[in-house]
Image (cartoon, helix red, strand yellow):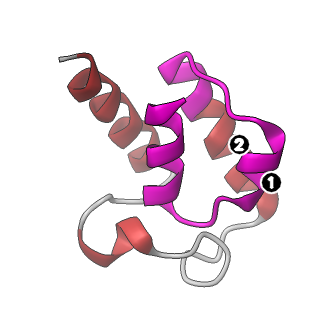
Amino acid sequence: MKTITNMKKAISVFNTYGIPLTGKRKSANFYRELQMDKMFVDGLIFELEYELKRELEDEKASKIETPSELIQHLLSA
């Protein structure tokens, strides 16, 4: 049940950034396909960490390039 609650929180944060997690968008590259700056990706990661009360290592966070990777790493942290 907690996983579902965390997914709802993550979806809400992604929606605030204008990223729907449906179809091809969940595997779209932040930088090439979604054309986001590094600063906005870092902000997205920070907000997700805050909402889910989890923290990623800086090294892992810098390698994440898609929404699905980000969710996978946060939910397994």
Which amino acid type is shown beneath numbered disc 2? Gly
User: Relative to residue 31, is residue 17 drawn left or right?
Assistant: left
User: Relative to residue 32, is residue 33 drawn left or right?
Assistant: left
Residue at horizontal 73 percent and vertical 60 percent from the top: 63
In percent of width and height, residue 11 lies at 34, 42
Q: Residue furthest front?
A: 76
Residue at horizontal 44 percent and vertical 33 percent from the top: 75
In percent of width and height, residue 27 lies at 42, 71
Tell me, yes or no, whether the two marked residues, 1 and 2, touch with CB atoms within 8 Å: yes
Which amino acid type is shown beneath numbered disc 1? Met
Residues drawn in magenta: 48-77
Disc 2 residue crowd, few under 14, some 14–19, many 20+, Cα 10 Å: few
Residue position marked by numbered label 1 in the rendering: 39
Q: Is residue 39 positioned above or below 24 on the image?
A: above
Q: Is residue 30 positioned above or below 9 on the image?
A: below
Name the chief secondary structure element in magenta.
helix
Residue at horizontal 68 percent and vertical 34 percent from the top: 56
| Quadrant (top left/top right/bottom left/bottom right) for the N terminus | top left
Q: Residue furthest bottom?
A: 32
Residue at horizontal 56 percent and vertical 75 percent from the top: 29
Instruction: Identify the mark at residue 66; answer none if there is no mark.
Output: none
Magenta span contains residue 38? no
In percent of width and height, residue 72 lies at 44, 47
Residue position marked by numbered label 2 in the rendering: 43
In percent of width and height, residue 47 lies at 61, 32
Q: Quadrant of residue 10?
A: top left
| Distance CA(mark 1)–CA(mark 2) | 6 Å
